[in-house]
Image (tube, rainbow, N blue to C red):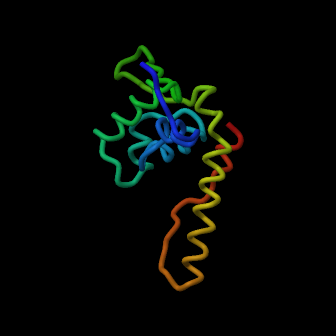
Amino acid sequence: MTKSYNMGIEATLAVIGGKWKPVILCYLGNGPQRPGALKRAIEGITQKVLTQQLHELMVDGMIQRKVYPQVPPKVEYTLTDRGKSLRQVLIVMSQWGEQQIAQQQAQGETIILKRSDYNGYLRY
């Protein structure tokens, strides 16, 4: 099957497009995460959508799933090298969004930014 893109950004969005995938990748940028921890950290995501997005990110080679042989089962998700290659893209997207929020706040809009720390993403 031949894929065709008008611009390179389409190929990027084919992998990280949508509301939740970039957020999931940012959380995984801080280190391995269990699905329950991701669910608690990402306000508003349903279990079904989280599971679906994690699966799609695995299929695209952005993350890997590790199952520990124990009872009860323990599962962790981590970034692959391919997933880590998006660090700068995600950081720049976060910084741009923070600038937009600051401008809107300066204009009197009430906007709450719950988390602006992505330093862990820089270390992992």
The quadrant of the image that shows the C terminus is top right
State whether residue 54 is above or below residue 118: above
On the picture, is 29 further left or further right than 53?
A: right
Residue 25 seen in render: no
Task: Kindly identify the residue that appears in the image at 30 percent across and 46 percent down.
Answer: 46
The image quadrant of residue 43 is bottom left
Residue sitting farthest toward the right: 123
Task: Kindly identify the residue that appears in the image at 51 percent across and 28 percent down.
Answer: 63
Q: Position of residue 75 (x, y in %)?
A: 43, 25
Residue sitting farthest toward the bottom: 108
Q: How many marks?
A: 0
Q: Position of residue 97 (x, y in %)?
A: 58, 62
The image quadrant of residue 58 is top left
Residue 72 seen in render: yes
Task: Kindly identify the residue that appears in the image at 48 percent across and 35 percent down.
Answer: 15
Residue sitting farthest toward the top: 69
On the picture, is 53 further left or further right than 118?
A: left
State whether residue 61 is above or below residue 104: above
Task: Kindly identify the residue that appears in the image at 63 percent across and 67 percent down.
Answer: 99
Q: Position of residue 110 (x, y in %)?
A: 47, 79
The quadrant of the image that shows the N terminus is top left
> In this orientation, which residue lies closer to the viewer: 46 or 17?
17
Q: Position of residue 105 (x, y in %)?
A: 56, 79
State whether residue 45 is above or below residue 48: below
